Amino acid sequence: MSVKYKIRDQQGLHFFTCTICGWVDLFSRTVFREVVLDSWRYCQEHKGLQIWGYVFMTNHIHFIANAKDPHRLEDILRDFKAHTAKKILELLNDHKTQESRREWLLYLFQYFGKRLKNASQQVWIHDNHPIELYSEAVVIQKLRYMHNNPVEANWVRHPEDWIYSSASNYTEGKGIFEVQLLWTGFEEDGGWFFGNVDFPTLD
């Protein structure tokens, strides 16, 4: 893996993309989206995770996060993906969970798990594609890109209309999942007031 896609600052602010194996539309189901949100809540409370923005698409999630010292982002992401994969597989094997694609999904995750040494099934692609966010401009670009995904997919007209996103946290001050806010308001010229994150001065 290229160095540019490794986490070098374990407490630094990063943009992540976590993708389901085979690009399967797992997150078209609410039950599986809730697995991720519940795990994030646990990691926020017990593992030092801070989420600053997110969006669910059908087969992947984008989010911006950092870790509070002394916690490490690599460790949090590893545990998050292991726990959510286990929970997703438990739900798929539980016939009380309504899922018309059950057999196909289990077969697919077993297929991708054949290459693993310590597991028989694989839910997540291993790479998290971490991108370090080193300036306000980069953060703004990533947040706008992330929040605009459902609009580009023609699901909604406005980013804040997609409830499985942090767009409404920023526009309305609330959402279905609590996030840290990277800015506290808007300037008249369309700029941002950043309130909670210190960025390094660029040369």
Image: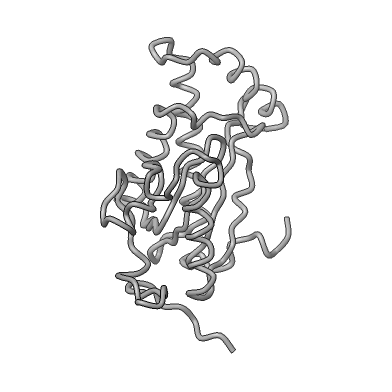
In front here: 178 or 11? 178
Q: Quadrant of the N terminus?
A: bottom right
Image quadrant where residue 183 sits: bottom left
In front here: 43 or 163? 163
Relative to 166, say whether 202 is above or below. Answer: below
**Count of labels shown?**
0
Q: Residue furthest top?
A: 95
Relative to 14, say whether 96 is above or below. Answer: above
Q: Residue at x 33, y 44 (%)?
A: 42
Q: Residue furthest left?
A: 173
Q: Residue at x 32, y 54 (%)?
A: 169
Relative to 55, say whether 51 is above or below. Answer: below
Q: Residue at x 47, y 42 (%)?
A: 56
Q: Quadrant of the C terminus?
A: bottom right
Q: Residue at x 36, y 57 (%)?
A: 48
Report x, y in % for residue 165: 41, 47
Report x, y in % for residue 69: 39, 66
The answer to whether 153 appears left or right of 11 in the picture is: right
Report x, y in % for residue 121: 61, 26
Specify the color scheme.
one colour
In front here: 55 or 189? 189
Report x, y in % for residue 98: 42, 14
Relative to 175, say whether 196 is above or below. Answer: below
